[in-house]
Amino acid sequence: METTGQKKGQLEAEVSKAITQWEKEYLGRGPLQVKTDILRNMLIVHLKGILTPAEKELTKTEQGLLSIKKIRADLIEAGNHHLKEIIHTVTGETVESFHTDISTRNAERIIVFILEGNLERKLTE
């Protein structure tokens, strides 16, 4: 059973590393922290420290806050095919759908990837 936990932990770390690399290459800046959890057929990715200093400044107004949320959502949507490829490459699972939201107040993003297969079960078998 011990190796199962290591496999799961290693895979979660690999996903975190791959998402961080994608953020750096695609968005020009990576998050300060990334934590990935595998739960049933979901990958839950929590990114902290994602805003640039200029974006942080913009979030001080309601209009700026909404602008950052929209721009970041549009950027993620535009790159979603590459994100899905990354997840498939790292996990071997096909992404059925993904959902994301950003907290501009906390400079955090959550991404939930819904996979076709139950990855957690496969790792515990």
Image (cartoon, rainbow, N blue to C red):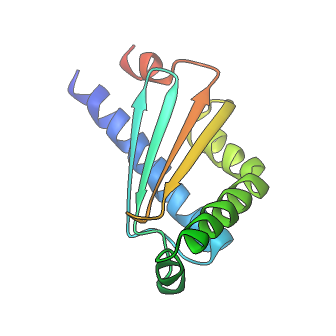
Q: Residue at x 46, y 39 (%)?
A: 44
**Where's the C terminus, which quadrant?**
top left
Image coordinates of residue 97 in percent, x first then y, are 68, 32
Q: Quarter-wise, where is residue 90 in the image? A: top right
Image coordinates of residue 111 in percent, x first then y, are 53, 45
Establish if 66 lies above or below 61: above
- The residue at the far front in this view is 62
- The residue at the far left in this view is 2
Does 56 sit left or right of 1 as displayed?
right
Does 11 sit left or right of 26 as displayed?
left
Q: Residue at x 33, y 40 (%)?
A: 9
Establish if 47 lies above or below 120: below
Q: Residue at x 58, y 36 (%)?
A: 113
**Where's the N terminus, which quadrant?**
top left
Closest to the observer, 47 or 82:
47
Q: Residue at x 51, y 75 (%)?
A: 61
Q: How many marks?
A: 0
Closest to the observer, 117 or 90:
117
Establish if 13 lies above or below 108: above
Closest to the observer, 58 or 114:
58
Image coordinates of residue 10 in percent, x first then y, are 37, 43
